[in-house]
Amino acid sequence: MNDTVKIFDTTLRDGEQSPGFGMKPSQKIIMARALADLGVDVIEAGFANASEGDFDSVYTIAEEIKGPTICSLARCNATDIERAAAALKPAGDKARIHVFISTSDIHMREKLNMTPDAVIEQAVKGITMARRHVDDIEFSAEDALRSDPEFLVQIFTAAIDAGATTINVPDTVGYTEPDEMYAFIKYLHDNIPNIDQAVISVHCHNDLGMATANSMAAIKAGARQVEGCINGIGERAGNAAIEEVVMALRTRPDRYGHIGTNIQTEKLGPTSRLLESITGCEAQPNKAIVGRNAFSHESGIHQDGMIKSAQTYEIMTPASVGMGETNLVLGKHSGRRAVAQRIEKITGQYVNPKSNIMVAIMQDFKATADKTPNGCVTDDVIRQIATPYMSTIQSAAQSFMARTHG
Ligand code: KIV
Ligand code: ZN
């Protein structure tokens, strides 16, 4: 690995900002411990001025969690910044204040009722205030991807001059597509004169299902911090899923020039499960990397390939992301090789996949699979199907042994 992308985890802030994902301070600290263990570089622990509970969460996480930088969100106003600074105090030099203000025409006009010049002034004021408390300042231009790129160059240049060490480019409404993101980040990278004094960060929402793709495009264009959430949770359709970004980098060094992360990938699965148990919301079964079906194969052709070599249908091992073992799900698309292998696993008895017994078993199996509501035939049912054939299978095996061993 010759280049590293920082992983900024906002599960406890943006992730929590969505219906059904609210967490109590006691749950946030459990999650923060897991995130630190996973190896994220920054934990956005909350929005300290949003509520007493959020303040307490940021404070407790800043006090207890060692390793990652601990961050609180704040608008560019004195109250938010003071609260963020107070909550982050125990983190010492590992504290980051993340200030933001909108920069798109629609947000400046409709939401802030401010002129672009006034927005720059407010951003600089906020950063200067935050800088009195900590050295590590992130500045976000909310709705950046719908903002005028020339205006962004101006505001980011002023932000870096005022002391911002990370400039974050949020696709707040998940509107962008990858080519556009690449060109946008490249433009900023090439036109902000003091960009060598800050890290470019990207923060993608998933309204069009492109949050991960956009994050990857941003990395190609020079972003070296990616913001996201475990399981891709977050406001509306969610944020970029950290596990996807990390594994895209890991799986495709040919595309990303050996850019890596500090994540211990085998902890991705357990961290995902922990979030599910805390929030009570399971990731969709077909969710990349951490979904329950991410390493399950049902079709006979795929199962046959998997039995011959896992690389035929898996681009990473389940163990490499802490997802246990490959699961060959037996259903109506499964073939006799997979069914025979499962019978052997359940009963300890080898069955020749090419034998007449297997032909008969497969008839019963397919009829059962067709009638099974979710299409998945469980091991208990396989055992029931195989049981009437067991004595024939055993005597076939015995006569085979007698023939081959004299
Ligand atoms: O989506 C967004 O714009 C945000 C910012 C506060 C970074 O969450
Ligand atoms: Zn966001």
Image: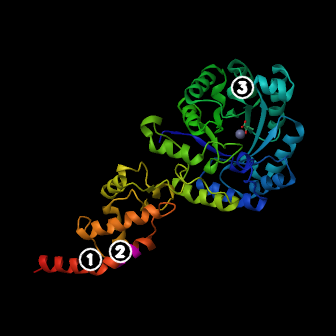
At x 31% / y 79%, what residue is drawn?
390
Task: Determine the main secondary structure of the stretch shown in magenta.
Answer: helix
The amino acid marked with disc number 1 is Ile
Judge left or right: residue 102 versus residue 6. right
Q: Is residue 158 above or below residue 290?
A: above
Work out which quarter of the rendered image holds the C terminus and state it: bottom left
Q: Is residue 335 above or below residue 111?
A: below
User: Tag 2: Cα neighbours inside 10 Å, few (<14), some, or many (≥20)?
Assistant: many
Is label 1 in contact with label 3 (beta carbons under 8 Å)?
A: no
Instruction: Tell me if I can see residue 261 in this picture.
Output: no
Q: What is the magenta range?
A: 383-387
Residue 384 part of the magenta-drawn span: yes
Q: Which residue is labeled 1 in the image? A: 393
- Callout 2 secondary element: helix
Q: Is residue 377 above or below residue 124?
A: below
Q: Which residue is labeled 2 in the image? A: 386
- Callout 1 secondary element: helix
Location of residue 184 (image quadrant)? top right
Give the mark, 2 or 3, whose residue is nearer the N terminus: 3
